[in-house]
Amino acid sequence: MKPRAALPLLFFGASFSCALIFVSCSKLNLGSNCLNEKSGCFKADTTKPQFYTASPSPGQTVSTLDFVDITFTEELKNPQPNNVSLTSPGDALSVARIEKISAYTYRFWMSGAVQNGDITFTFDRLTDYNGNTVMGSLTLTGNVDISITFDQSIATNPGYRRGVSNQLGAYNSTTIRFMHDFDGDSVANGGLDANDWKVYR
């Protein structure tokens, strides 16, 4: 009966030893973890996040602006609209809300109307998780005075006819084709196709 009584004691002793080893190892890890502020190898993050890219891209001309997708070089800490400095003609635009759409990319939802002139975002009140402020800015160009050109050349607008009327011998129809300087105004994007109008007398 005595050997059987010794087994639980031996098992208890082994469990107690493992617990001591685990606690000892944990204390050593705290001192060698360079992410721990109290470790000897810890280095504070002082690198400032930077503006990286955006869509619409910097310098692009826009006539409407529902949102801007902006990518930074690292994740931001809880960015809010009041942390963004925005200047626009007549102060007609504002940032309504900010939505994170990927690791370092945020969608800035806009409120207001575009007017002619520069639209500039400054991010020096946005920070990363260590309080480092963002460097860089984004400027777009607002333009609501879009010029339109009518194509009166038979070579490029074969359906064009001058002098449509109901008089005898007059043309009974003409094609009005106009072009504008919006981005993507091409046949491939439906620009010229979408801007053809057939007019009948």
Image: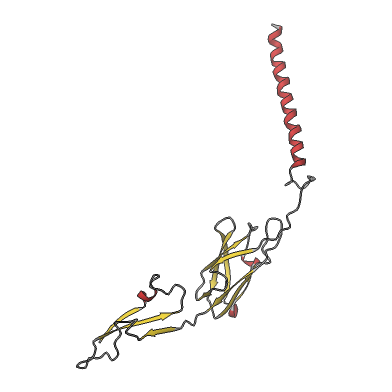
Quadrant of the rendering where the N terminus is positioned: top right
Residue 11: x and y in percent read: 69, 18
**Across the whole image, how many numbered discs are drawn on residues?**
0
Q: Residue furthest front?
A: 155
Of 31 and 4, the residue lying toward us: 31
- Indicate whether 161 appears above or below 4: below
- Residue 84 occupies quadrant: bottom right
Which residue is pictured at 72% across the width and 26% down the height? Answer: 18
Of 55 and 155, the residue lying toward us: 155
Residue 122: x and y in percent read: 65, 70
Which residue is pictured at 54% across the width and 79% down the height? Answer: 115
Which residue is pictured at 71% across the width and 12% down the height? Answer: 6
- Indicate whether 145 appears above or below 11: below
- Indicate whether 37 appears above or below 1: below
Residue 131: x and y in percent read: 71, 59
- Residue 50 occupies quadrant: bottom right
Q: Residue furthest top?
A: 1
The color scheme shown is secondary structure
Quadrant of the rendering where the C terminus is positioned: bottom left
- Residue 200 occupies quadrant: bottom left
Q: Residue furthest left?
A: 168
With 200 as the anchor, is 26 left or right in this view? right
With 123 as the anchor, is 199 left or right in this view? left
With 157 as the anchor, is 112 left or right in this view? right
Residue 93: x and y in percent read: 57, 74
Of 140 and 169, the residue lying toward us: 169
Q: Residue furthest right?
A: 40
